[in-house]
Amino acid sequence: MNIGIVCYASVGGSGIIATELGKVLASRGHRVHILSSDTPVRLNDYQPGLSFHRVETPSYPLFREPQYLLSLANKIVQVSRDERLDIVHAHYAIPHATAGYLARQILSSAPDGEVPRVITTLHGTDITLLGADPSYRETVAFCIQQSDGVTAVSESLKADTYRALGVECDIRVIPNFVDCTLNQRRDVGALRERLAPRGQAVLIHVSNFRPVKRPAAAVEVFAKVRRRMPAKLLMVGDGPDRPRAAEVARDLGVAVDVEFLGEQEQVVPLLSVADVFLLPSEQESFGLAALEAMACEVPVVASRVGGLPEVIEDGVTGYLPAVDDLDGMAAAALTLLTDTPRRRAMAAAARRTAVERYSDARIAPKYEAYYEEVLAARTALL
Ligand code: GMT
């Protein structure tokens, strides 16, 4: 198949999944075209069958806002014509579902033009935070509904979409995935020695430090753990809540044991150092960062929200206290850090879950089958 994938280039789960999907599909013989405003973070090496199309958005003194939706729709039209795309797969509804809809309308207005099918994958904040906002709601709902196919990354997000947007289309759940060959625990003794030189326990938080991720709460949980045992916290990522998280670390007197590492391209070595992953998010439709930790044998302590209970089995691959129960999260982390046999068993279960339920080899065929189904529905209409 010829597949166009539209995604964000910034650090974030939807762009990562879109790019990783492009790589897997190309390795399975499809021709994949990734469309974005910049090279996505995980699109680092040349791969046969995979190409990148930059969306340029010209500025003009009259505009106070960049006209990205227009330039993206235009680019989808061009790439669809040049590459004869069968599928345009929009990752994150805002504004990608709208750009896909516009492009399809433009293409179908041309006589004898080939019209690709538009599939939208909902990732989370495009529904729960932004899509439900009255400023966007009607347009987002309309464009999702107009897609030829819609997927959501968890049952929880599917339910949220029906509830928040009132759409009536069928939504297929295809969960996120992880490359379990690349994402596996490595021997990083020297790095661990450097980051935790006195044999301290190592906790880690990886996110884009937006308010919804609550990085400051991760520091609060850590401070409670630190009161009971020697430990270090690695804070990986960057974003608006980083200064607040650093301030909380100072206020709670644990700044010396909290390392802010900023955005990191190579997270696997850092996960390989860690004993526990902290994800105290306010909302999380899936929690890709948690899944990547699990693939690296790191049990997760996260809030019991959204799609996290679908990914993390409470008491088996991690712990899921209520979102405001920071004491519970600290107690769960302490259980893992002090009970080594239990931590090892949960680490192994976490890896097993990643391999058996969420490996790319297991999930990519689900997307292929869905593409085929959507294309077959078109053929039936002709
Ligand atoms: O909200 C973010 O932090 C980023 C966002 C994205 O699209 O990049 O993440 C959402 O999509 C990820 C990939 O499907 C999910 O793993 C995250 O759980 C989801 N974030 C939220 O629901 C808050």
Image (spheres, rainbow, N blue to C red):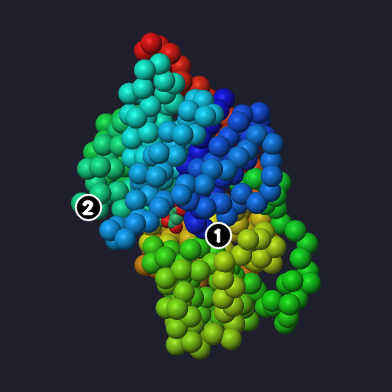
Q: Which residue is mark 1?
A: 300
**Where is residue 322 shown, x and y percent of the image?**
39, 62
Compared to residue 331, the image places residue 150 above or below, namely above
Picture quadrant of residue 105? top left
| Labels 2 and 1: the sequence-earlier one | 2
Does the numbered disc 2 mark a residue whose Cβ is under 8 Å from ligand 1?
no
Q: Residue at x 30, y 37 (%)?
A: 143
Along the horizontal axis of the image, is 36 left or right of 190?
left
Give the residue type at disc 1.
Val
**Where is residue 157 shown, x and y percent of the image?**
38, 44
Compared to residue 251, the image places residue 337 above or below, namely above
Picture quadrant of residue 32? top right
Between 55 and 284, which is closer to the camera in this rendering? 55
Report how far apart the C-alphas of labels 2 and 1 lie in the structure.
Answer: 35 Å
**Where is residue 257 shown, x and y percent of the image?**
59, 82
Q: Which residue is mark 2?
A: 135
Crowding near pointer 1: few (<14 within 10 Å), some, many (20+)? many
Looking at the rendered structure, the secondary structure element under dot 2 is: loop
Picture quadrant of residue 192? bottom right
Looking at the rendered structure, the secondary structure element under dot 1 is: strand
Give the residue type at disc 2.
Ser
Q: Residue at x 74, y 71 (%)?
A: 191
| Residue 376 visible to the viewer | yes
Q: Residue at x 66, y 60 (%)?
A: 266
Q: Where's the N terminus, which quadrant?
A: top right
